[in-house]
Amino acid sequence: MSRTRKVVIVLLILISTPIGIVLLRPNLVLNTLAKSALSELGFEISSLEVIHLGINSTALDQIILHSEDQRVVLSRIHAQYSLSQLLAGTLQSISIGKIELRSLSSPDSPNEEASTSLSSLLDSFDAIPVSEITLPNIELLSHDSSYRIGLGLQSPPLHIAGDAQFEAVQDTVIEFDIQRTNSKNLTVEARTLLAGALVSESEFELNVAENAITVTATSSLFIEPLQAQFENLLPATTAILNDRLTLQSNFEVQELFGNTSIAQLSLVLDSPSSWLQISQESDLGSNAMQLRLPISLQGDIATSTGEMRLALSEIYGSGGWALEDATSQSEHTFRDTQLHCTSFTSCDMQSDWQSNLISWRYGEYLGENTSVTAPLRFNYSNNEMRLAADLVQILVPSVRTSSESAISELVTNFQLDEMEFRVGDVISGGFNFSSSEFRLDNSIADISNPAYSGKLQLEDDILTGIVEIDIDQRLRLGIGLQHFFLRDTGDVVLQLAAIEFTEGEPLSALITPKQLEADVVAGQIEGLANISWSKQLDDSWRFGGPIALKIDQLSGYYADYFFVGLNTDLFAEATTPLGIQVTNPASASLSRIDIGLPLEELSWQYRIDTLTGEIQIIDFDTALLGGNLSIPSARYNPAGDRQQVDVVLADLRVDSLVNLAEYPGLEADGLLSGYLPFIIEGDTISIEKGLIGALKPGGSIRYTPATSTPSSNQSLQLVNDALSNYQYQTMNTEVFYSEDGELLLNVQLQGSNPDMNNGQAINLNVNITDNIPSLLKSLQASRVITDELERFVSQP
């Protein structure tokens, strides 16, 4: 038997007692009749306090009833009747000042009460032999909440009016009025007030059958009184800009007092403006959203088991967001949204999602029409939430910059495959990704068919990832990473797969520089790095790990220079802050470099530090003009400090130098050695009094002027005559080079011309000037760089 019917019968027992009180012994009959009848219902009287017993009225101060799962306290009971009504088995009215119903069983205890129906319950109310019942204070107390209801009941026909309050929702009162219009229909009017302000009002029409109730309802929700509640419940300052929302409901309730279910449910949320408008303000920015109405929901719900099937109409929303130097305008659509639950703890939902960032800005970067589409699947079971999608497509048609930048526009389309995220005791998930289009417009270089793909996975506190970046499916960079969130440590492995360049497949086929002429046409490059990181106690990050780069027989050109056969094995360390440092000198060699002045068989050692920008060269050595040029040590510091680099020259052939300079009519031989103190300061280079001297036994100089006509300048004619067959024993030269590129050679010669004055000794002082940048350009112009490079590369 339901608890409601039990209460009705208890009231009938209390109503019938005055007859016995009047006709027989009142106290004895009251106790005996009540105990006997209540015992059949599972109740016992634990306390009964009588104030007044009479032929027209009865007053009881308190009755306390107990059952296995309930405790009922009825206080201030007053019944009005006449003798004729008592003889007819009816009463005029009953007033119970307070009813306290306390549940003694746990919420999960099984309900073994017999089934009933709303129709029979309504008939029971109509059969109550009391015209009017007043219950101003009914308290329903359970384990986790309490309710207070006050109502007045008239019957027949049934009419209940009253109000209800809930402990969990302070200052909230629900006023209701229920009328039975005929044997099958009920009308219900309800109003909700918050702190005295009207929040909602509803009208219900109930059609009652034996085991089902058909409900049609119209509700209005008034927003203004709820604004303060939003501030308390939501983390952001939220305001709904609508004045009123409406809800249309149609559904059928089956087996109300058994395994209750709701069938043919139809809900429609609407607004007079056809939009739900919301604004928010928080530390994450300001947000203005609008949701297109109406939104409808249809389906079936089994409230006893939690099984349900629901379908939502299309949901469309748009809005704008702003935070400091970031803004966005977007629109979002959810289609074919369906929810299926087998219980309250196991649900599946699916929806086709599409979002479009119409425009966005972050700092100097701007984008338009960035879109995301995905068929989403949501699952909740075993206290775990799961979000999945077989395919997520992301289109980024344009990302630009509003300032002067090397990168002007980025375009990419990519997809996420097998995406899944799980939230339970731990957070886990992952996805695969790959690009179908990737373009990076920049002022540095054109990149041929760049693409990327990979996989990201989060398991417990470990993030792992694999990424591959390739250019035209030839140049590939592989990235493998992992990060441990609990320990704040991780590492990344970077591997540049070996790539070989040829004249048919040069570097320019993959990457073409825009602002300089450069290319690599031969050789091979590969690299490997393993960089780790960890968070320190002071919240700083420490980096470390080995970096290796191998360059083998690399040949190419830059501007008017070309190089052949570059080799190096670089072993470096990652530094803190993140940078690269070569601590132990690395070795390098180069077969030839031609800057107009050819250098051959170069070798050196080097150290670099990217944090300071410092470069150190050690034991540099190269063949030059038939001799040798070496630099014991050189250091470059980008701070611009004045530095001196001593260049040592040994055994340079004078004839090679003369041929390089291409002075008309000049021939010379001999060997030169010396040193040049280069001064590097900022971006300038100069030489302060370098010294070069001829090696013994000296050499010869033969100069034939372009014209045989003697010079009118006797001194100049004397020099020309002396140099026509000059045999020198000493040639000392002071070298000066200014920052503007001007070279000055103060040459002192000691020797003789056997064809003059019987070989009389002749000492000459000659000043030679030239502009080295112009000289190098003229030397470079005398050759076709690509032809020269091809000639040397093709040599075995």
Image (cartoon, rainbow, N blue to C red):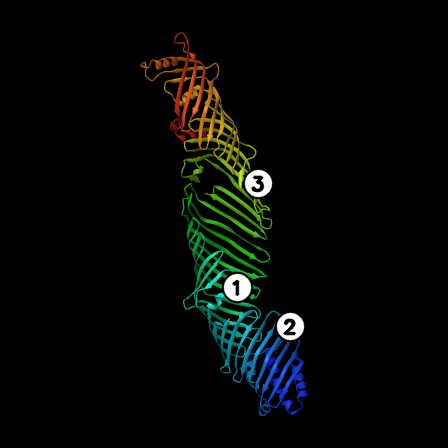
Which residue is drawn at the image coordinates 54% and 48% (left, top)? 465
The residue labelled by disc 2 is 105
**On screen, residue 186 above or below 86:** above
Q: CA distance from mark 1 to mark 3?
A: 49 Å
Q: Are marks 2 and 1 in contact (CB under 8 Å)?
A: no
Closer to viewer: mark 2 or mark 1: 1
Q: How many marks?
A: 3
Q: Is residue 223 visible?
A: no
**Amino acid type for the residue under numbered disc 2:** Ser
**Amino acid type for the residue under numbered disc 3:** Gly
Report x, y in % for residue 789: 43, 30
User: Which badge, 3 or 2, comes first in the chain's sequence?
Assistant: 2
User: Which badge, 2 or 1, comes first in the chain's sequence?
Assistant: 2
Residue 571 or residue 447, whichever sits in front? 571
Q: Secondary structure at mark 1?
A: helix
**On screen, residue 116 above or below 759:** below
The residue labelled by disc 3 is 545
Q: Secondary structure at mark 2?
A: loop
**Left or right position of 74 against 254:** right
**Amino acid type for the residue under numbered disc 1:** Leu
Q: Which quarter of the picture shows residue 127? A: bottom right
User: Which badge, 1 or 3, comes first in the chain's sequence?
Assistant: 1
The residue labelled by disc 1 is 233
Residue 60 or residue 773, whichever sits in front? 60
> Which mark, residue 770?
none
Residue 606 or residue 369, whichever sits in front? 606
Label 3 crowd bin: few (<14), some (14–19), many (20+), radius 10 Å? some
